[in-house]
Image: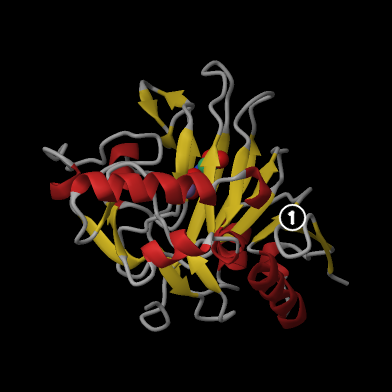
Amino acid sequence: MIEVRPYRPRFAAQVFGLPPGTRLGPAAANALRQAWLDYGVVIVRGLHYGDDDLVAVSRVFGEPELAPASERQARGGGLRPDVWVVSNVIENGRPIGSLGYGEAEWHSDMSYLAEPPTASLLYALEVSPEGGDTWFADMAAAHDALAPDLKAAIAGERINHPSSLTATGDLRLGATRPADVRSAPGTLHPAIEVHPETGRATLFLGRRRWARIEGLDLAASEELLDRLWAHATRPAFVHVHRWQVGDLVIWDNRRVLHRRDAFDPAARRIMHRTQVRGSAVGRG
Ligand code: OGA
Ligand code: MN
């Protein structure tokens, strides 16, 4: 039987007793999906997953979404298009994956899409002995704890989620550096979203760098975004995951921001990630 043990009352839980990904029955699938909605981050440990298991468990949450095209091209052929490799390992002079070994700044995955992924799944094949922890911040809790003046300042506002940079600050393939934040290409999303499945209000911030609040002058936008980010990433809303090989972490990309600590470039870290397509209804 599936057991769910929360790290916090309403955020981040470990799930025990999950059958292998390719053999999930409807009861286990429903329990996993419900834990993901309830806690935002679900952690399963001690797995021996291949990509078929990872893709099968991803389908519990919906249809697969392809990883960023530029990074699939940059990595070169050979691997399946539905699994994105996050790694610092270099083989034959080429990185086998994305994001390297540096710090990855706080972000939501692929929020430059009009319908960003609903779920992201990250599975650890090789981990660094130190560093490389992944941090998750609960934007539903952050919303609920907004000071009234800050909440009033962002109510009804939309944020431009820039599309040109990866979480480690690299330009995506084909992207150019804009003259300034006002001309950075991206997609507008409301600063506060109602989660389509739980009905909870949540902050939806994307990433800080090159973001902009629509209709505000640059200085006002920067000032308000800085206040918002300082609030949203307070330790009270954060759960830090220290990886072991065989860990699978599934997060609700609509509710949760994540970042990663840097790690030793000489260490090897290999993760396989999938993401689940956003639905055409529900955001707004
Ligand atoms: C990701 C990501 C961070 C990490 O896969 O979307 O941000 O810990 N990964 O590798
Ligand atoms: Mn990410």
Q: Is residue 258 visible?
A: yes
Nearest the eye: 134 or 143: 143
Q: Quadrant of the N terminus?
A: bottom right
**Residue at 21%, 56% in the rendered image:** 216
Q: Quadrant of the C terminus?
A: bottom left
Expressed as whole percent of the image width and height from the top left, the position of residue 60 reads: 60, 73
In this rendering, is residue 150 above or below 86? below
**Residue at 35%, 70% in the rendered image:** 115
Q: Secondary structure at mark 1?
A: strand
* Residue 51 position by quadrant: bottom right
Q: Is mark 1 within 8 Å of ligand 1?
A: no
Expressed as whole percent of the image width and height from the top left, the position of residue 76 reads: 32, 39
Drawn side of residue 246 relative to residue 255, left or right:
right
In this rendering, is residue 10 above or below 210? below
* Residue 109 position by quadrant: bottom left
Q: Residues within 10 Å of mark 1 (few under 14, many from 20)?
A: some
> In the displayed image of the protein, which residue is found farthest to the top?
266
Q: Which residue is mark 1?
A: 44
**Residue at 51%, 67% in the rendered image:** 202
> Looking at the picture, which amino acid does disc 1 mark?
Val
> In the displayed image of the protein, which residue is found farthest to the front?
149
* Residue 181 position by quadrant: top left
Drawn side of residue 272 relative to residue 37, left or right:
left
Nearest the eye: 169 or 272: 169
Give the number of marks: 1
Drawn side of residue 185 relative to residue 85, left or right:
left
